[in-house]
Image (cartoon, rainbow, N blue to C red):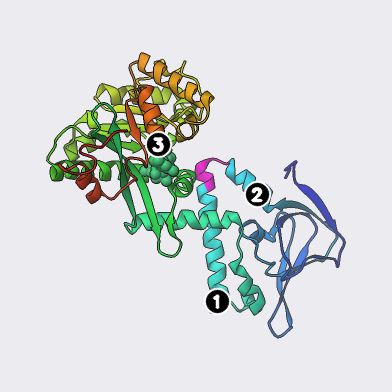
Amino acid sequence: MSVSTNVVKSFKAGEIVMRQGDDGDCAYIIEKGRVEILLEQPGGSVQSFGTRGEGAIIGEMALVDGAPRTATVKAIEDCEFLAITSKDFEKRLESADPIVRMTAHVILTRYRDTLMRAQITGENKAWTLSESIELSYSGTSSAVERIKLANELKAAFDNGDLHLNYQPIIDMSTGKTAGFEALMRWNHPEKGPISPAVFIPSAEETGLINVLSQWALRESCTALKRIENRSGQTGKLFMSVNFSGSDFGVEGFADSLYNVISETDIQAHQLHIEMTERVLMSHPEKTKKVLQMCTDAGMHISIDDFGTGYSSLSYLHHYPINTLKIDRSFVIDMVEDEGSKVLVKSIINLGKNMGMDIIAEGAETVEQVEALRSLGCDMIQGFYFAKPMAEKDAADFVSPGGAGAQTALA
Ligand code: C2E
Ligand code: CA
Ligand code: CA
């Protein structure tokens, strides 16, 4: 076995390799020699739990969490081990193929759960540990926290605990609401609201994102239809839905969009597909093909967080893009910083020259709104006009007499 970055450690016969209850931050693969596994019982007696030889792995729970060693390991011959630190393991897992990564996460979590259950119920007397060790399981490493979050997110989705909020986007030429962006929300029963900036990356890591995206798509288009019905308007408002890079690689992705449009009875131009520049650049050919199919069918494509990725407008004309969304960071700085203002101005001008609409994100003050309007920005999405809101409030917002049916522009 050759893992060049891992350290080889030697132990003489009779030496203790690891001690039960001590902190462990690495596992060992036995390259040479044999070890004995010893379990200290609460009364102080020591029980042998067998021996391990070449090729076996010991102390592997250190790769799952930061809990203390669950057994003592003693070299019974001169030994050589390959040490794998939890940091190294995490790094390798992160760079692994997503399927391998997810499978490893699931197996490790189940392994840990089985072990915990055995300890708590005493199913297997050999695994009974002292109370102090059991209690210290509350402190887990970030890897375990991430696995836990991913599992909880999956359960939350299965239980219907995720929902969407809708943030209005205001047309600067009319002062009316042009459409909404659908934003996912997760209210954790113990931890309270968890930001999508935290749980979306987790969903991307485990592959759950594709299911979440499809759910958000169907749910938001259905909501748009209900909002239209409640507010008495048809075919005017758009719904902007966020998609992640891997969504574009899912077989039949464009078909799923057509199907939802047809089943929810909205018009194709009402669906705006949001994706970041990064996604565009990471799978250029595949994404281009999918986007072409979408625009041919009449849907709109929006580039999200524009300016934060490759900051180059030159590649944009290769793609069928309808809208650029200028990232909030530029909008925040533009009133005080002339450089940011110049940048916003050039994004607006170049985008418009290429026939695109411009949406500025995250305007919170009257000064920002005024500055954006003077630069010719088409639409604004920001707390100045409205925060993301529940579907019912979104319907009221755009109903006749509602705050978003006719906003007071600066
Ligand atoms: P985003 O796509 O850039 O969404 C806009 C974010 O800016 C939202 O944060 C929104 O609440 C926030 N925002 C809008 N106006 C203002 C403002 O005036 N001030 C401030 N401080 N914030 C403003 P949110 O809802 O927390 O979402 C964070 C990110 O999570 C989103 O950024 C998006 O990248 C991701 N996300 C949310 N929902 C979904 C989803 O359904 N699918 C995917 N793939 N990603 C999502
Ligand atoms: Ca977005
Ligand atoms: Ca954005």
- Ligand 1 within 8 Å of disc 3? The answer is yes
The image position of residue 163, as x and y in percent, is 32, 52
Mark 3 packing: few (<14 Cα in 10 Å), some, or many (20+)? many
Which residue matches tag 1? 120
Element type at mark 2: helix
Give the main secondary structure, helix, strand or loop, of the magenta stretch: helix
Residue 20 higher or lower than 94, as above or below: below
Mark sitting on residue 363? 3
Mark 1 packing: few (<14 Cα in 10 Å), some, or many (20+)? some
Q: Which residue is drawn at 16% across and 43% down?
A: 401
Amino acid type assigned to the residue bearing label 3 in the image: Ala
Q: Residue at x 37, y 13 (%)?
A: 353
Amino acid type assigned to the residue bearing label 2 in the image: Phe
Amino acid type assigned to the residue bearing label 1 in the image: Ile
Residue 357 higher or lower than 2, as above or below: above
Distance in Å between CA atoms under marks 2 and 1? 28 Å
Element type at mark 1: helix
Mark sitting on residue 89? 2
Mark 2 in CB contact with mark 1 (< 8 angstroms): no
Asked whether the viewer can see residue 349, the reply is yes
Q: Which of 309 and 130 is in front in this view?
A: 309
Residue 244 higher or lower than 11, as above or below: above
The image position of residue 48, as x and y in percent, is 72, 75
Q: Give the range drawn in magenta.
A: 96-101
On screen, residue 15 versus residue 99, left or right, reads: right
On screen, residue 18 versus residue 402, left or right, reads: right
- Mark closest to the chain's N terminus, 3 or 1: 1
Element type at mark 3: loop
The image position of residue 103, as x and y in percent, is 51, 50
Between circles 3 and 1, the one closer to the viewer is 3
Q: Let me know if residue 229 is in the magenta part.
A: no
